Image (tube, rainbow, N blue to C red):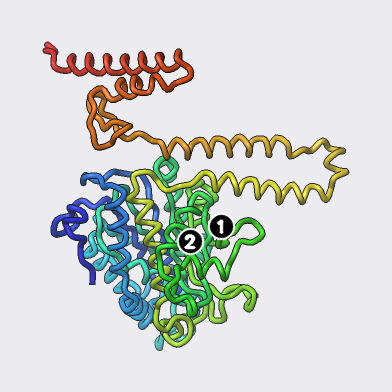
Amino acid sequence: MLRLLGTDDYEVGTRIKGITARAILTLALGAVGFLLLGFIIGWFAKSSGSSNPSQVSQSMRKEFWDELKAENIKHYLYNFSRVPHLAGTEENFLLAKQIQTQWKEYGLDQVELTHYDILLSYPNQSHPNYISIVDEKGQEARQTGQTVVHEKACWRPRRTMIFASWDAEEFGLMGSTEWAEENVKLLEHRAVAYINADSSVEGNYTLKIDCSPLLYQLVYSLTKEIPSPDEGFEGKSLYESWHQKYNWTDFKDAPRINKLGSGNDFEVFFQRLGIASGRARYTKSSKEHRYNGYPVYHSIYETSEIVDKFYDPLYKNHLVVAKVRGGLVFDLANEVIIPFNAQDYASELKNYADIVNNMGQKHKSQLDTYNVSFYALYSAIENFTKSATSFHSRLKDLDVKKHIIFAPSSHNKYVGESFPGIYDALFDIESKSDQRSAWDEVKRQISIATFTVQAAGQTLEDVL
């Protein structure tokens, strides 16, 4: 089912070696809290492999997407839901062992089963009066999330990826919260993003994204490269169908992206630790169906059969969700520069401030009486916006050529120059209106070259 990328794309050899990934899989795969799959991408470690140019990274992502198959997602969903596996039962343990074995085969460095005591009792023939734990959680919400995770092509990421299955979500998000609290220092300093992967399909109308504003541009960019699965949008991108069906007309001309709320395992990472987070799924039309969730949500009928017959018979929506989530994880883990956009954050801050300001204006007399003003908030947002704009402008002009002696000329990239900093400063000297500043730049470049050559020579001297 899976194959490695060719050595022309990336030198991974015949198998994944030292892939900087770790998986944590909880033992309790049962219906009372199973499988809120999350991906945490962080700067926990850098792979020992050679770095990839951006073009190679995009080529690898396309190869990654091409490996995803709807029929395999269908197979996994059926496999996970065909046999009941309540927490603490032997069936549940066997399924956990099966997933552990599969994840190891797929190249993850480490997959742990977290063992704990299940303080529940189930009725049986000899003890009919035991308390019955009804399958209240259901199956599909978590298992369709897991199935799209299994579809992947192997590659060596730049950053560590942790795949985690959290238990006890409905009882206070205990699994994810306990793990995050145990690893809080590591997460605060090194985590880059958290991608939630629970229910993949809750309807078949359009894509739905909830995420941090830092991820907006990455989401838009990825969906423009993925074909739409929707009828009437053949030959068009997922972005186009999503845009037409769920437009953000009251704010900007783009597909609507929702704010992350609570009641899900991303809460501890996003709300408490401030880690950029996101989730993707296919959903129903909010105009036609205003109820929360879907009719069989958290019932015993959430099985592969309902997906086969009603929600997604061809598994094309599951496949699209797998591509969106996979693309997010791939780029966040593999791009040289983390694909965040602070300008979108600035824009959202202004929007959020307008909302609360409008609320406040309904009590204008009280604002005046108690000397309440939004001026300082708007001023801070304006300063943040300027900083974000400047930051991304500098990123575009980021000079990654660090060699002081040799580098391509800024005027002809095909020609190498010696002492390129001095050369370019002198080359531009006559075109500069501020001659003093221009010659100061020449002096600065000479100083840099002088220090570098002097320091290099000292490394060759006898240290004894």
Question: Label 1 belongs to which residue?
Answer: 260
Residue 407: image location, x then y, percent: 25, 30
- Residue 216: give x, y in percent of width and height: 50, 54
Q: Residue at x 31, y 58 (%)?
A: 23
Q: Could you tell me the amino acid type at mark 2? A: Arg
Q: Percent x, y for residue 280? A: 47, 64
Res. 439 in view: yes
Q: Nearer the viewer, residue 463 or 238?
A: 238
Disc 1 packing (10 Å; few <14; some 14–19; many ≥20): some
User: Given the image, on which type of amino acid does mark 1 rest?
Assistant: Leu
Of pointers 1 and 2, the one earlier in the residue sequence:
1
Q: Is residue 274 left or right of residue 114?
A: right
The quadrant of the rendering that contains the N terminus is: bottom left
Residue situated furthest top in the rendering: 464
Residue under the image location 59 percent in, 59 percent down? 253
**CB within 8 Å, label 1 to label 2:** yes
> Which residue is denoted by mark 2 in the rendering?
279
Q: For the residue labelled by badge 2, is the local secondary structure a helix, a strand or a loop?
A: strand
Q: Along the line of sight, which residue is nearer the eye, 58 or 162?
A: 58
294 vs 356: above or below: below
